[in-house]
Image (cartoon, rainbow, N blue to C red):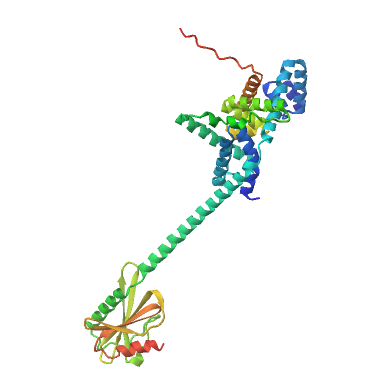
Amino acid sequence: MAPNDRALERPLNESDIHAYVDGTLPDDRALLVVDYLRSEPGEARRAGFYARLNTLLREVGSQADETGSNRVRAQCTRVSRARAGRRMARAIAVLVMALTGLVGWIAATRVNPEQMDAAVTMALKGAEGERWAAAQTVHISGIGAPDFTDAGLRLVGRRSMNIGLFTRVDSFIYLNAQNEPLIYASTLAMYRFVRNPWIAHRVGTARLLTWPSGWSRYVIAGEARTRGLMLAANSTAKK
Amino acid sequence: MEFRDQLVEQVPRLRRYARALMSNREHADDLVQDTLERALSKTEFFEKGTDLRAWLFTVMHNLYVNTIRKASMRAMHVGIEDEGVAERDEMAVTPNPAGSLELRDLDFALQQLPLDLREVVLLVGLEEMSYSDVALTLDIPIGTVMSRLSRGRERLRSLMSGKVPAARLKVVQ
């Protein structure tokens, strides 16, 4: 049996009437509906009303004027801008959080001047307690240990001190001709500096010469009477 | 075409449907605006390539149903002025008075229909949606669509022909 025959076999139902009125019924079924309506005047009037109803509804719809459309378009624009504003606010919030995190990290990984002075002073006191008479010049690989030979100093050791969770101060121990120790240390600064002349200050009997340069701060420490202290600090200014 | 522009294209259809759904023109326009705002804020829920019109009508349907539900929970009093009687333009003279009367009768009769019947009649008759699209929009089986369409149209026929059954008075003893 062909598909069309099967369609014709199924008795007409209410859905067919509505589908016929709405123009969605297949042609072969529509013919059955037409025959039925011809034989049933009451049903024909009913189907006629439904068709008229569709026409009236579309007339009602066509009378909707466009005066509100501008208002709606403006609303769309406002909503779009509000969404863009919220996206921008979220982006700014993420940026602020990232910057805050970066600043916090920088603060956590930098040694402030007071911490630096304390660490260097402790290193100096530690070095003073050691016997250096027979110490030979050592060669320490890597950067960070300047050559103070011209100042009459020789490198004899290295110390590393942890300050906080993320920071560390590396210091180098030099001896002058009298085997008196001097400490040289540097650390990353919070800011970038133009090279400044060193400044001297006392911590107990120790004298600390400090200066910033670039992204680093430098300290040379020794007892106030230790020879070569200022020569070493001056020699770094020439480099 | 940007999504926003596609939405604006649908505005006339949304407005005529909303105005047919609700008797009050301002409420209808508010519903359209709410629909567009919701659509713009939920673009991630629209699947590109699918029928935007059907999606928008679904959004509007859900918004309208929620509005009705909230109004009934608040037992909102609706004043006469809110019914948009002034919108009916009683004194207007039109070129086709008979047609205008017929449209007003239709408008009045539509508002007498329960919402579930009114929506289906409008989506099929006004928006010319297929039965399957109406089923998707309203999230109901297609059999329910046909049932509501049949009952809605027949109810309108009764209302517009003046053959609405009279209310039965209770016998008070």
Whether residue A11 is visible, yes or no, is no
Q: Nearer the viewer, residue A205 or A179?
A: A205
Report which quarter residue B56 is drawn in.
top right
Quadrant in the picture for the C terminus of chain B: top left
Q: In the rendering, at what x and y percent does residue A65 appear? A: 66, 39
Name the residue at 29% across, 73% down.
A115
How many numbered marks appear?
A: 0
Q: Is residue A90 left or right of residue A169?
A: right
Name the residue at 33% across, 77% down.
A170
Q: In the rendering, at what x and y percent does residue A81 appear? A: 55, 52
Q: Nearer the viewer, residue B143 or A99?
A: A99
Name the residue at 40% across, 89% down.
A238
Q: Nearer the viewer, residue B66 or A238?
A: B66
Q: Is residue B34 left or right of residue A211?
A: right
Position of A91 relative to B71 (above/below): below
Name the residue at 65% across, 40% down.
B12
Position of A90 relative to A156 (above/below): above
Position of A68 relative to A107 (above/below): above
Q: Nearer the viewer, residue A72 or A213?
A: A72
Q: In the rendering, at what x and y percent does residue A98 appear? A: 44, 62
